[in-house]
Image (cartoon, rainbow, N blue to C red):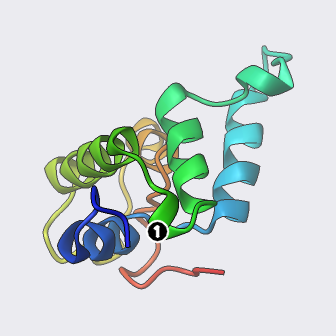
Amino acid sequence: MSEHVDDALWDEFHRVVNMSARELDEWLATDAAGEESEPDPKQRATPDGRRVLDILRKRRGDLTRDDAETMRAVVDHVHEARRDDLEPVAGDAAWRRDLMRIGHDPLEPPEGRRG
């Protein structure tokens, strides 16, 4: 087990990040490929989105202190933007895109479609 990530952080991160690594990767590629852009594949996501994607692809024991800080920041950001129950809710497009860039789809139930 990673010494940097306790059970509470691990569980809450995976509760709020309700997109799978594949879904997030596809979303980041789509989001960056807006109507007016031709992104460099290496720069296709926000730094936070890339960090979340990296975390989702790691085993818990391989997480670093920086990963733990990112996980806490993501949990805090989602909780600031959402109700605590995380029930599906529609919002404006910019709000949803902001959350989806860090792996949280506000239209998905708290359990998400992990996979």
Q: Badge 1 local density, few (<14 within 10 Å), some, or many (20+)?
A: some
Please identify the quarter of the rendering in which residue 12 is found.
bottom left
Image position, residue 57 (x, y; %): 63, 60
Q: Please, is residue 45 above or below residue 13 in the view?
A: above
Q: Residue at x 86, y 16 (%)?
A: 38
Q: Secondary structure at mark 1?
A: helix
Q: Nearer the viewer, residue 33 or 72?
A: 72
Q: Position of residue 71 (x, y in %)?
A: 33, 51
Looking at the image, is 45 positioned above or below residue 10? above
Looking at the figure, which quarter contains the N terminus? bottom left
Q: Decide if residue 89 is on the left or right side of residue 6.
A: right
Side of 85 where 61 appears, left or right: right
Residue 10 lies left or right of residue 101; in this view the side is left
The amino acid on which the numbered mark 1 sits, given as a three-letter code, is: Arg
Seen at 73% across and 63% down, the residue is 22
- Does residue 2 lie above or below 38 as drawn? below
Q: Nearer the viewer, residue 114 or 83?
A: 114
**Image quarter of the C terminus:** bottom right
- Residue 94 drawn above or below residue 46: below
Q: Position of residue 80 (x, y in %)?
A: 15, 48
Front-most of 11 and 95?
11
> Which residue is denoted by mark 1 in the rendering?
60
Q: Is residue 101 left or right of residue 17?
A: right
Residue 96: x, y in percent? Answer: 44, 48
Corner quadrant of residue 111: bottom left
